[in-house]
Image (tube, coloured by chain):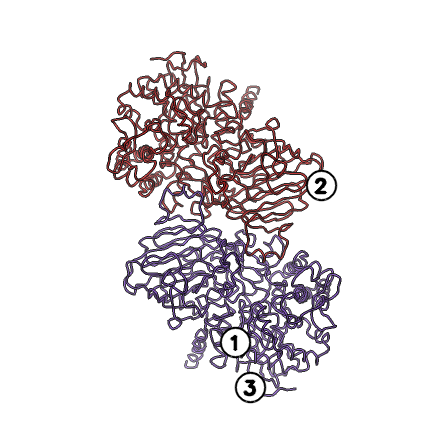
Chain colours: A red, B purple
Amino acid sequence: MRKIALFLLFPLISVSQNPVKYVKPIIGTQKMGHTFPGATVPFGAVQLSPDTDTIPYERNGKYNGEVYKYCAGYQYDDKTIVGFSHTHFSGTGHSDLGDFLVMPTVGALQMNPGVATNPKGGFRSAFSHANETAEAGYYKVLLDDDKIWAEMTASQRVGMHQYTFPKSEQSHIILDLMSGIYNYSDKNVWTYVRVVNDTLITGYRQTNGWARTRTVYFAMSFSKPFRSYGQKNFDAKQTYRGFWRKFNQDDNFPEIAGKQIRMHFDFATSENEKIKIKFALSPVSQDNALENMQAEIAHWDFEKVKNDAQASWNKELSKINIDASEDDKVNFYTSMYHTFLGPTIYTDINGQYKGLDQNVHQANGFTNYTTFSLWDTYRALHPFFNLVQPKRNADMVQSMLAHYDQSALKMLPIWSHYANDNWCMSGYHAVSVIADAAVKGVYTGDANKALEACVATANKRNYEGIGSYIDKGFIPAEKSGISVSNTLEYAYDDWAIAQLADKLGKKDLAAQFLKRSENWKNQFNPQTGFMQERLDNGDFKPKADVMSTHGQGFIEGNSWNYSFFVPQNPAALADAMGGRKKFGERLDTLFTMHLPDAFFAETEDITRDGIIGGYVHGNEPAHHVAYLYNWSDTPWKTQAQIRRILKMQYKNAPDGLGGNDDCGQMSAWYIFSSLGFYPVAPGSDMYSLGSPAVKNAQIHLENGKTFSVETVNQGDKNVYVKKVLLNGKPITDFTIRHSDIVNGGKLVFYLSASPSR
Amino acid sequence: MRKIALFLLFPLISVSQNPVKYVKPIIGTQKMGHTFPGATVPFGAVQLSPDTDTIPYERNGKYNGEVYKYCAGYQYDDKTIVGFSHTHFSGTGHSDLGDFLVMPTVGALQMNPGVATNPKGGFRSAFSHANETAEAGYYKVLLDDDKIWAEMTASQRVGMHQYTFPKSEQSHIILDLMSGIYNYSDKNVWTYVRVVNDTLITGYRQTNGWARTRTVYFAMSFSKPFRSYGQKNFDAKQTYRGFWRKFNQDDNFPEIAGKQIRMHFDFATSENEKIKIKFALSPVSQDNALENMQAEIAHWDFEKVKNDAQASWNKELSKINIDASEDDKVNFYTSMYHTFLGPTIYTDINGQYKGLDQNVHQANGFTNYTTFSLWDTYRALHPFFNLVQPKRNADMVQSMLAHYDQSALKMLPIWSHYANDNWCMSGYHAVSVIADAAVKGVYTGDANKALEACVATANKRNYEGIGSYIDKGFIPAEKSGISVSNTLEYAYDDWAIAQLADKLGKKDLAAQFLKRSENWKNQFNPQTGFMQERLDNGDFKPKADVMSTHGQGFIEGNSWNYSFFVPQNPAALADAMGGRKKFGERLDTLFTMHLPDAFFAETEDITRDGIIGGYVHGNEPAHHVAYLYNWSDTPWKTQAQIRRILKMQYKNAPDGLGGNDDCGQMSAWYIFSSLGFYPVAPGSDMYSLGSPAVKNAQIHLENGKTFSVETVNQGDKNVYVKKVLLNGKPITDFTIRHSDIVNGGKLVFYLSASPSR
């Protein structure tokens, strides 16, 4: 009996490790991280978070650079909060969303947000980080202007607010339907609101932003009936409004529509009275939003919602247990937290979602996800999901294939969110995610159909130079400003397609795409040893500047970094660069060069924080580069550089991220590298070994097995790997396979302060 | 055997009367009728009709009066056609719609419509009435510029085009998604188009017009694949367009969105090659539009669709057979045609529709209808439906009750179309339609619920003075610019509610509303004998101008006309005006007075064509007035005036209507009056007798019975009724009941050239 009791206790002890306590959502909210500190559950459709400013996209008709700071709505250095909105990207470098901003106020009604230098002039409020708590699934702050405590939590499709008011006859809750992220004057296309009764409103907001045609439906429920309500319509004009003036539509009028609308709901509150709000979203309809609310939060117990949210985080975060320093635990679990912020659920509780074709679809047998920042996330995020979220990653593949089915273009997503594609960045990396999931046995759906979608996308001749790429093996600089990035990334993607074709026994197709995957060679200038732009006549474009990130055929990178972009065949690249020794020296130069200030002035998304020598970790194209030493004659330098990047680029601080987290890609790099291995070429089942930063770790797999990473002689200076044993057998090729992990087992790194040359 | 054969032939002979041949949709297209000449089926959701101009709502930022001429898109005097669009109101005095304008062209692509004075400068074309055919369910015209024959027909939810092209390598079909009726610069909210393949496109258009939030989905199928296609986007700016420029989105790009878009589809055509288009609409989704298309027109046989359309018209029009002059038959069947143009079906083939709450609903057990111009149509159109379209009218009542259920305001529709209410005009006349249908046994649904909706609407205190009306018995002039119209119409509506309550045995409620129905007395100034504005203090507003239609408390009428608006109790009105003799003299004065030119200058919707003396037939408030002689001591003058109005106000000519047809109300008046009776007070089961214009008529009822109207001694001068026999029994009170009709029977008018004093 006693033994059984102890046995039963064991999982409870495991849960009581409570990794949520190591999650600090505030990390990355300062400077370039572009993360948000608010409340959400893993992969939740709602990200309820404070917006510290809603800088418009344009000022005096021109692009306003400051808007970039507010990709996630929140900047740590700001002193005021405008309100709390329900949708946010995590870590992007362009943005959208920020839907349905809610703000509690007391006193005379203010329908404008005011300015940061004078928060009392509007409904925004001063706040202090001293009175701010940001946890996984929970956010709390004191709004200084009116002494209102604001608390937030969430379920998958519902945000829950709890505002603790002072005593007042004039307490208000503002619902700002104009506010948004990357808001420009014409972004709001339409808003509709229906006041169903004195505790419930429903409606939708339609925008024309980064997502061209985006509608979010909502249902908003108040714990206490409002005494009165009203709108202020900021539309420039409403020609037919005269006809609608049979009522005073500004006050207590329940059928509201327009382009620029803010609403207020008015209450009398007693001292410390709590007013709670449930705010549900749907991509499909008001009815679905209401159904989502009723299904997910049928009560008004804020603490229960918070506890459920944090339990769901503990469940996901407990998939990896680590032993490490407290700071490393913070960085590790915050990274895991960041990786589980997206892609987000884009299916209502009844299985409906809006497709790319703007029709309503039923997700049969899968959960539909949205927000695929694939240029970033194909690298490490989706491979990470193949380890710890295989079910979800299979659904994400399914979601991308549904996108393909719904695409009139017949293309897989490039950068998609909310039933739109913005075709941002280069490559067609959905094929990498699909191939990786299929090769690793994670995607078990119709692989032939998946292959067909990959091939169709890769053969879309009128997209970004693909026609030239197919015909000539490279993209002439005349055809595209990012011709070299495109060729290099297409070549890698084609290799991934070849892996999938090979797995399906389609030898001809595999050979065809394997051949295409060698196109990187056509951008490689053997005279200079760098990837360079070529002209339509085949000549390399003269006067290449291998340091510059502008006008050289690259995107978010220069030739120095991009010249290493042959993840599918580092050995061949090393050969092209003069052999293993010279390859190592080239890597040395990259990691030690000094970049001039001019470099930072002209390069987007990057500051000195995000670089080591000339190696840019804050952008993605070089994320595999530190592992390339494994193909040089100085493989131990991978180990040293990885440990260095882990230390330098990830810190337990608001400015702890050296660049945009990019929907979890930066964080997924951290997790893999901390554990000692990394997927240099997703689409293969191989991981390249580095040097683990954890003392040890257990990865609890969905198949019930556990894979352990252990270290011997771990320490800050002991970054070098003397030997590695997989289930007791030494590894000599710096490689483990996916199957080694999913079969369960133990990987032991013996560490040392000096390299094993 | 022979006998049987003859018997079987009889119905065929009946059908072979082919009333469609008497329908001239061109009647009312000149001047003020605001009818359209295009193709539609009875109550069809598609009205596919030529637009001769798309005058913008504003010019130099101000209202452009000319837009009023184009309420139905077509003016007979115009010399050019811009294109053929799919939705049109019939006879309204304000407007909306004109969705999805299609135009065939040949030669160099022109993406602007050009101007009427130089049609060759744009895609519009000159045309001539000599080459134009407008029939029920069919329209044909030669487009002179490019010598293209355009033909149109329709099913309930699908318009079918047939264009006969000349030989050309450059034949085009333009799809203009910007064009619309009552179009102002900001009306187009959003457009989305998906090119599914080279013969099919789907999408939607969302507008902010008279209907505030209106979306129409479509599916467009071509009989021949287009060789190429493209768009021109006229949006002022698209901030994020750069991101979408990964493709050339102007040419052959299948995912299109924006606010101001025109598309072109390009073909090579041989001489006389026909290209056909099926264009389906849905209020719900692209999928539903496609389903509607496939369900209604599964083939490409234009002639079959045309024949089906005309057969459906013959079926509806054959519900009344008349013997009359050829001109009278034209006027009669064209009037019937006009009455069956709306309300229109607003339910997809699968039963879904968009509700007032902007949610998708399933119509269970009824067809949902839209476009309720109730201030006009409660008078004679819906009563006419109670005779010949009881099933549809019951569904219309059901549709209005669904509107009530979906209304956050909890009101029945005032003037509703496409899931919106524009609250146009005065009164809450849905209650009249409901009461009339219930009292006559046509609406057999939940009458208690219907009564609840009527009472809730009538007690909506913050709507148009209702609060004052309830409290004071009249509406102070300070509260409303149309206070007198409102009081008079509310009083009538309240009487209708009382009839419904009485039928349901709710005696208290009936008494309460019967009392309210006497509120007309509070606007009647016994000093002047006219209905007049009163001030909040109870005094009549000084210096009333009983001739003016502006600033006197009326809408679309002056005090002279509106003072007769007590349809629920003409006897009491006659008493108030000094008794039956004086009442008759007042009516004489109305019909003989001379109106000064200034009257027409300041009065909307009316010209000298629409008046007789001071009696305004072109607007609705006096539509019952000619029948009021039946309550005077000169009842024969009803007979003379009715025959006079029938002759003067309805002509077999493009300008044959003296005022807006107003969704069939003008035409319904014609039909009732031609048959010799009229519903002076819908909500009662009584009709007041006039003088029939037909020689005889048979009304074939849905219950299988027939009611006949016969005349003895009919003739143009024999307008007076000597005696009337109902099933052989004389009628002495100028009244028949609805039950007299639906039980079947015969009404015989004995006519004479001199009155029976």
Which chain does the residue under circle 1 lie in? B
- Which element carries disc 1, helix, strand or loop? loop
Vertical relation: B541 (above or below) A204: below
Locate residue B174: give its quadrant.
bottom left
Which residue in the structure is indicated by mark 2? A169
- Which element carries disc 2, helix, strand or loop? strand
Q: Give the Cα separation between the discs numbered 2 and 1.
A: 64 Å
Which chain does the residue under circle 3 lie in? B
Residue count near mark 2 (Cα–Cα under 10 Å), binned few <14, some 14–19, many ≥20: few
Q: Give the Cα separation between the discs numbered 2 and 3.
A: 77 Å
Numbered tag placed on residue B650 in the rendering? 1
Quarter of the image with the N terminus of chain B is bottom left
Q: Quick one: A694 or B26, which is closer to the camera?
A: B26
- A548 vs A98, left or right, is left
Q: Where is residue A122 drawn, in percent x and y?
A: 62, 39
Which residue in the structure is indicated by mark 3? B717
- B39 vs B485, left or right, is left
Residue count near mark 3 (Cα–Cα under 10 Å), binned few <14, some 14–19, many ≥20: few
